Amino acid sequence: MFGFNMFDNVGRTFKTQYRCYSVSMLPGNERQDVEKGGKIIMPPSALDQLSRLNIVYPMLFKLTNKKTERMTHSGVLEFVADEGKIYLPYWMMRNLLLEEGGLVQVESATLPVATYSKFQPQSIDFLDITNPKAVLENALRSFACLTTSDVIAIRYNKKDYELLVLETKPGKAVSIIECDMSVEFTSPVGYTEPWQKEAPLQETEDMAVDSTDYQDTTQFVPFHGSGHRLDGKKKGTEVKSSQGQNAQMKRGIPNYDYKKGKITFIRAPKPAERTADESCSESIFEAFSGEGQTLRRKGMKGKQ
């Protein structure tokens, strides 16, 4: 039995076909650790064959759907599947366009160590994650490799997020086991940039309008009745501006001649002197002109 052909398997690659099924079809308890990662479960015969071949560790495999020519890469988690079957995460079966029980070719592969990867979230819900890089780093611990154009699935806070692998360096497929990899994200699918606020319109000379146009005489004007002054002078409506011109003050109209750093004190004009006839014909209000009363009479001063 021993001869020159006893080492024929040394240096050969592992290549065979299996019936593939999703992890939910795996007998026994539910295996969420397989579903949320990027590794497959193979039969024990595969381990026996791999141990007799010169396979480079860690074990990485190229999975190909011959019907659709779709391809991806994965690692292996366990060798406990039934003979002739392998179990894949559901997201991997969707990338390969495989149905339950479909044939898939499994071939051993050697991949370069990753240095860079770029992802695109497939939903804007991914923006709700506070630290997406930390979440992705923790999720990729269950993966062995990445393939460009794959849509991987990660789970965070009991919710699944899908990420499209846009780019990997230094190759189209890379190993991410014990590597220092830079990660970038692009805008999620369906994300739109917020509208930029328009700059406020600046008033030009053509747009300037006379301030008197804004005065509405039909509106209620508070304190518009007549009044009396305590000094006896008549309340006037004409005031003298800081420039020496008489201007009527209107409520709600700003002073457009105001200059920064300048304070203007508006004073009432001095009332004109009245003649004797005008004083007699028009009664002038005098403040505190009534008679007063005292508690002590004049004749009782000094008497107890």
Image (spheres, rainbow, N blue to C red):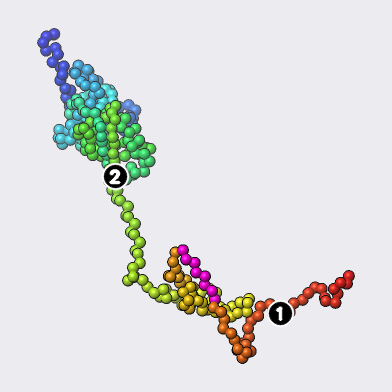
Q: Which mark is residue 290?
A: 1
Residue visible at 39% across and 74% down in the picture: 210
Please identify the residue farthest to the left as the structure is shown: 4
Side of 186 relative to 281 (left or right): left
User: Measuring 28% from the left and 48% from the top, which residue is drawn there?
Assistant: 190
The answer to whether 293 appears left or right of 12 in the picture is right
Residue 227 in view: yes
Position of the N terminus by quadrant: top left
Q: Position of residue 194 (x, y in %)?
A: 32, 52
Q: Earlier in the sequence, mark 1 or mark 2?
A: 2
**Where, quadrant-wise, is the C terminus in this rendering?**
bottom right
The residue lying toward the viewer, choosing from 211 and 55, is: 211
Residue 291 is situated, as x and y percent measured from the top left of the image, at 73, 79
The stretch drawn in magenta includes residue 8: no
Quadrant of residue 24 within the rendered picture? top left
Q: Is residue 142 above or below residue 242?
A: above
Residue under the image location 25 percent in, 23 percent down: 58
Q: Secondary structure at mark 1?
A: loop
Mark 1, other Cα within 10 Å: few <14 / some 14–19 / many ≥20: few
Marks 1 and 2, Cα distance to the nearest angstrom?
85 Å
